[in-house]
């Protein structure tokens, strides 16, 4: 399957430009053909103008059309076959079986959103009919529904080249509600992105939608990302990546004449608290599970458990030994790109020289210094040294973890209080442990978007109840999720119609409920018409 290296502006390949960049195979260090053209300011302008022009038609598209569109994207992605997987493997170093699973998740989430759109109740229709006889003031007829915000800019994530990239969770949730999308592909996997963008273009055609509903831009400069966020036609932004990148885009959006929301998923340490009963009962088993979760995907998951807390004593020594042994046996793995592996090595080296920090164990085999590889490592520190050095609470993206030894339950609670916002927080405990740790649970509810019991945070289910978002800096807005069907709420806003003649109202709000939606009518939830 040949690649042309161009961006797609409303379905049409862009013109070649003098500036290009190459993808690199992290497994060999070799540059991969072809060269990809940096997109120009004129193309940014054209993509957003087309997005804005298509927005009214897209908003009016029927649920059936949009469901068909999302399903067609899924079909087109599958039709790319092994060519997609082998290009993604070459550009990211991720194993083929992982990429096959990720493609399944990508296609699955497209189909899940298609179902949500077809069913339709996501629009949260609310109707309060007029009460003309009410005294002292009559009530007008009020009806509200969620409407798309307009063009959304999506930044592809490096660590999910399919499920959080061109046709990933941010894109699909925005398209589902009728927002045109302009994607800035991640420069580490441009060929994968071009293939998927081609698949989306074919689906746009098949669905009979205006071409401007989707554009895809290639580029490897911060200037491109900033220009997209600052463009006056952009109405919202979806981002997954570093805290520094997310914060820069958040600030750029806030500095606009008309600020817009940036839904950025940035960094999380995903703390794991092991309570005394669980440590005694199954310390070795938890150690093995922790090692697996920490090294999965070479630690390049936003939900990697980077911090573990437990109370000192004999059981902790048994756990410590088991964890050290497990990490010692874990092999180095290829990381996504040299920027990530370099940042990983530097962050581990910096953490190791903090007072009170010791290396508990690292992988027996050294990483190949010539390649972007990550060697698993587990560090350990006492609670006082941890609490007094805030730098130890910064994410290390890669297969590294820090074990913090607390003095007692009170100390554990104190440590939990000192944490920043997180995507997840985990408790390992027995029923008796839990009874004593109610306060800890309450603290973790305040700190994290997802609280787990006796499990590990990696492996995020795409479903209606999933919450993948937490207080800053885990995400920029903890009220929303970037995974699961609720992710679409980021791209809509409510509009209330007062005293509108019924035939002029959107279908969702008409008396006869022609779409058969679940609606809140005069305080009662149901599908009835009236
Ligand atoms: P990144 O450097 O944050 O880049 C993500 C995207 O944002 C890229 O398209 C990048 O484009 C753009 N970008 C970054 N900084 C920008 C800025 N100041 N202005 C405008 N655009 C900007 O993330 P990455 O390349 O995926 O990985 C680097 C680090 O991010 C990792 O070491 C890790 O710490 C973190 N990360 C975290 C997660 C997570 O889920 N929490 C996921 C992936 C990565 P350009 O490079 O073209 O400017």
Image (cartoon, grey):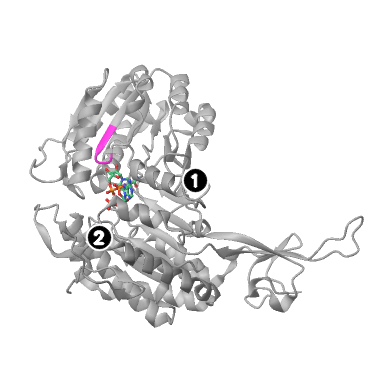
Q: Earlier in the sequence, mark 1 or mark 2?
A: 2
**Which quadrant holds the N terminus?**
bottom left
| Residue 224 visible in the picture | yes
Vertical placement of residue 527 versus 265, above or below: below
User: How many neighbours does mark 2 have within 10 angstroms: few (below 14), some (14-19), or many (20 or more)?
Assistant: many
Position in image of residue 149 (x %, y %): 53, 62
Q: Is residue 434 magenta?
A: no
- Dot 2: element: helix
Q: Is residue 395 left or right of residue 365?
A: right
Q: Nearer the viewer, residue 369 or 194?
A: 194
Position in image of residue 330 (x %, y %): 18, 40
* Residue at image coords 19%, 47%: 335
* Magenta stretch prevailing secondary structure: loop
Q: Is mark 1 within 8 Å of ligand 1?
A: no
Q: Quadrant of residue 271?
A: top left
Q: Which mark is residue 287?
A: none
Which span of residues is magenta-colored? 397-401
Vertical placement of residue 278 versus 38, above or below: above
Residue at which label 1 appears: 477
Q: Which mark is residue 99?
A: 2
Q: Is residue 144 left or right of residue 175?
A: right
Position in image of residue 305 (x %, y %): 34, 38
Q: Nearer the viewer, residue 337 or 8?
A: 8
Q: Exactly how many numbered labels are in the figure?
A: 2
Q: Quadrant of residue 231?
A: bottom left
Position in image of residue 239 (x %, y %): 38, 52
């Amino acid at each position: 399957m040949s690649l042309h290296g161009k961006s797609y502006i409303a379905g049409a390949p862009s013109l070649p430009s003098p500036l290009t960049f190459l993808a690199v195979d992290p497994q060999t260090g070799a540059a991969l053909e072809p060269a990809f053209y940096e997109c120009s300011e004129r193309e940014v302008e054209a993509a957003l103008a087309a997005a804005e022009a298509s927005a009214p038609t897209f908003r009016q598209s029927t649920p059936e059309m949009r469901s068909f569109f999302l399903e067609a994207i899924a079909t087109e992605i599958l039709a790319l076959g092994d060519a997609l997987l082998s290009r993604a493997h070459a550009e990211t170093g991720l194993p083929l079986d992982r990429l096959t699973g990720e493609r399944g998740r990508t296609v699955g989430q497209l189909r899940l959103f298609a179902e949500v759109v077809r069913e339709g109740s996501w629009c949260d229709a609310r109707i309060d009919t007029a009460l003309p006889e009410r005294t002292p003031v009559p009530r007008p007829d009020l009806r509200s529904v969620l409407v798309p915000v307009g063009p959304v800019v999506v930044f592809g994530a490096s660590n999910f080249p399919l499920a959080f990239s061109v046709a990933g969770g941010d894109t699909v949730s925005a398209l589902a509600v009728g927002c045109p999308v302009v994607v800035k592909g991640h420069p580490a996997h441009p060929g994968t992105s071009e293939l998927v963008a081609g698949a989306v273009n074919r689906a746009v055609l098949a669905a009979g939608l205006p071409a401007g509903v989707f554009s895809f831009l290639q580029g490897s400069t911060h200037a491109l990302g900033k220009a997209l966020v600052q463009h006056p036609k952009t109405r919202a932004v979806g981002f997954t990546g570093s805290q520094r990148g997310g914060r820069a885009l958040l600030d750029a959006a806030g500095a606009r004449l008309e600020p817009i929301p940036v839904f950025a998923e940035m960094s999380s340490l995903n703390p794991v608290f092991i309570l005394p009963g669980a440590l005694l009962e199954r310390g070795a088993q938890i150690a093995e599970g922790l090692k697996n979760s920490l090294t999965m995907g070479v630690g390049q998951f936003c939900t990697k458990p980077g911090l573990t807390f437990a109370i000192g004593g004999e059981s902790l020594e048994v756990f410590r030994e088991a964890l050290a042994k497990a990490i010692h046996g874990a092999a180095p793995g290829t990381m996504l790109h040299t920027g990530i592996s370099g940042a990983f090595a530097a962050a581990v080296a910096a953490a190791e020289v903090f007072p009170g920090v010791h290396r508990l164990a690292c992988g027996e085999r050294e990483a190949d210094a010539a390649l972007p590889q990550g060697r698993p490592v587990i560090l350990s520190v006492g609670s006082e040294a941890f609490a007094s050095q805030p730098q130890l609470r910064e994410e290390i993206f890669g297969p590294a973890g820090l074990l913090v030894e607390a003095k007692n339950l009170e100390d554990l609670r104190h440590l939990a209080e000192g944490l920043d916002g997180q995507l997840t927080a985990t408790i390992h405990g027995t029923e008796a442990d839990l009874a004593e740790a109610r306060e800890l649970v309450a603290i973790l509810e305040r700190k994290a978007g997802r609280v787990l019991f006796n499990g590990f945070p990696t492996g995020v289910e795409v479903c209606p109840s999933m919450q993948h978002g937490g207080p800053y800096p885990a995400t920029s807005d903890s009220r929303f999720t970037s995974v699961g069907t609720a992710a679409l709420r980021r791209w809509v806003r409510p509009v209330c119609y007062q005293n509108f003649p019924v035939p002029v109202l959107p279908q969702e709000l008409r008396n006869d409920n022609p779409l058969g939606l679940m609606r809140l009518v005069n305080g009662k939830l149901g599908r009835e018409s009236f």
